[in-house]
Amino acid sequence: MFLSSISIWSTAAALLQVLGSLGIFLYGMKIMSEGVQKVAGDRMRAALSGMTGTRFRGVVTGFFTTTLVQSSSASTVLVISFVNAGLLTLMQAISVIMGANLGTTITAWIVALIGKFSVSKIALPMIGIGLPLFFVGKNKARNWGESAIGFGLVFLGLGLLKDSVPDLRGMLQTDPGTAHAIENIINMLGGHGFGSVLLFMSAGIMLTLLVQSSSAAMAITITCALNGWFGDVATDPMGVFRCSAAIVLGENIGTTVTAWLASTGASTNAKRAARAHFSFNVIGVVWCLVMFYPFTNLVWSLAGDLPAGLRSANKGMSSSEIAFATAIFHSTFNLANILLQVWFIPQIGRFVTWWVKDGKAGAREKLRYMGSSLVDIGELSLAEADSAIRKMADLTCEMFDGMIEVFKLPNEDLSSRVAELKQMEDTCDEMLHDITTYLIQCSTHEIGSGNATKITSNLRVVAELEEATDRIYRMVKVVQRKYEKGRDFSEIQHDELIASSTQVKMLLGVAKNSLVGIDGKTFECAHEIESRVDRLRKQNNKAAAKRMQEGSVVQTEMIFIDLNNHMEAVANHLLNVIQAGRREVRAD
């Protein structure tokens, strides 16, 4: 009984050591990814949205993006987020996702290399370099320090994981009960020919779903192979390698779940991108299963040609070389899968379009924050908010044009147009809520100081745009009341209001363009336009007061003054939008 208790405690302690090592690896990957996003976030956003003109450029972009953030789940969720924002088309997204699958294979090579040198020679110096930068540095220097610390923790975690996973052969001497239990499980999965390949592949799917990271699942797989969990490397190296390869295939399916979950509640095209990721990986696994034995034989022969520095002095394949064979399989499989399917991106697009039907006509896509469960992408997710704000600005311009249309056509029945404008105003209210919630969620994640400032500005921008649309709709209601009461404006009144609206229209254009940047000259021009609107309001209201003294209809003049005041208020809100981008906010 006493010995049994000791065995249980030792097993629990060993399990906690493995989990702790895995935790250091995952936390390091998170820190490194977020640091890289802060250092290169703008360039990565530009690469994703601007360097995907052809399918091959999209593949390359996906590869390098995933290599930087070291998480295919994070980069795939980011791609789906960009599709949701309309920054990437479905076809572009499919090519980037293909490249992301290849980029994540870098982790397997890092794990394989761990066995060939002392990890502390890299991990601890990297943390040592990053620590002073992180605590003393500012902005970019601090972000570089964070990246270095994360990189060091990744290597440290992998090294600890390698040391923590017990050697099954050694366990036969120290803990034979647990060792035999593990052997029985492996033997139960093995010995069924091709059926065992499917069983190990299913284990790979479950492992990836459990740890929610294909990189972590890959690290566990290679580490277990290194320590004899899939059989004796000395007596059956090919069998051990094929077990690892089958698990890798399962991990390629399991990693698609993160993107699938992230697309829930997103736009139709975002859901299609997630289904494309799933379809691409499943099709790849299917053809690889059909060609499993000849394909693994090919990879085995490639592993046999490894450079001498990566080979063991012992005859035959060493456990270290099993790790490299698994890394080669992972990379070769994904590269071959890309080369086979990159030509059929349009067909994959048509298939997922058939799979995910279009939503209801006229339904507005909700803005929803998407993130990986392990790696925050708040730094890169701001592009989706920027896109939504531009849509809100477009809607504001459309509402103002609609108001002018209603004003200029007093003799036509425009009740349906007024209803449309009301719907636009309601949509802007909803967009204010969605974008504000989204930006707040982004701000709760790790972001750089520059983007923190941008979030503050954007929160003011959407608030001002919503206030502007409220004012525009109030003008529509005033114009509607004017017609219902039979209040006719004189030609002078009509021309004065049109002159003011022309200036506001100009300011709308400047405000819309300011969302992507504004120079000092244009900024000064915006101030001048708003000042002209203010002067026109004062002149027009003064003229209206004079006309009332001369016997003009008071109710008509009050409607005229009301429209003038609303016009100037819209101009104020638009100027606030422009100033928010320059960290200047005008008080109402």
Image (cartoon, helix red, strand yellow):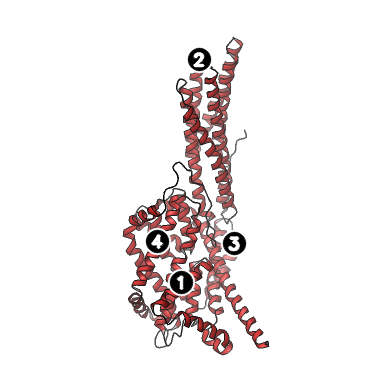
In the picture of the structure, the residue carrying the numbered disc 3 is 134
In the picture of the structure, the residue carrying the numbered disc 2 is 490
Q: Position of residue 2 (x, y in %)?
A: 68, 87
On the rendered image, what quadrant is the C terminus found in?
top right
Q: Earlier in the sequence, mark 1 or mark 3?
A: 3
* Residue 279's disc number: 4
Q: Amino acid at mark 4?
A: Ser
In the picture of the structure, the residue carrying the numbered disc 1 is 202
Q: Earlier in the sequence, mark 2 or mark 4?
A: 4
Q: Position of residue 417 (x, y in %)?
A: 47, 30
Q: Mark 4 touching mark 3, by CB under 8 A?
A: no
| Residue at disc 1, secondary structure | helix
Q: Amino acid at mark 3?
A: Phe
Q: Mark 1 touching mark 2, by CB under 8 A?
A: no
| Residue at disc 3, secondary structure | helix
Q: Amino acid at mark 2?
A: Ser
Observer-nearest of 417 and 26: 417
Q: Position of residue 56 (x, y in %)?
A: 34, 58
Q: Residues within 10 Å of mark 4 (few under 14, many from 20)?
A: some
Check the image and report above or below for 382 versus 244. above
- Mark 1 or 2, which is nearer the eye? 1
Q: Earlier in the sequence, mark 4 or mark 3?
A: 3
**Residue lying furthest top in this view?**
550
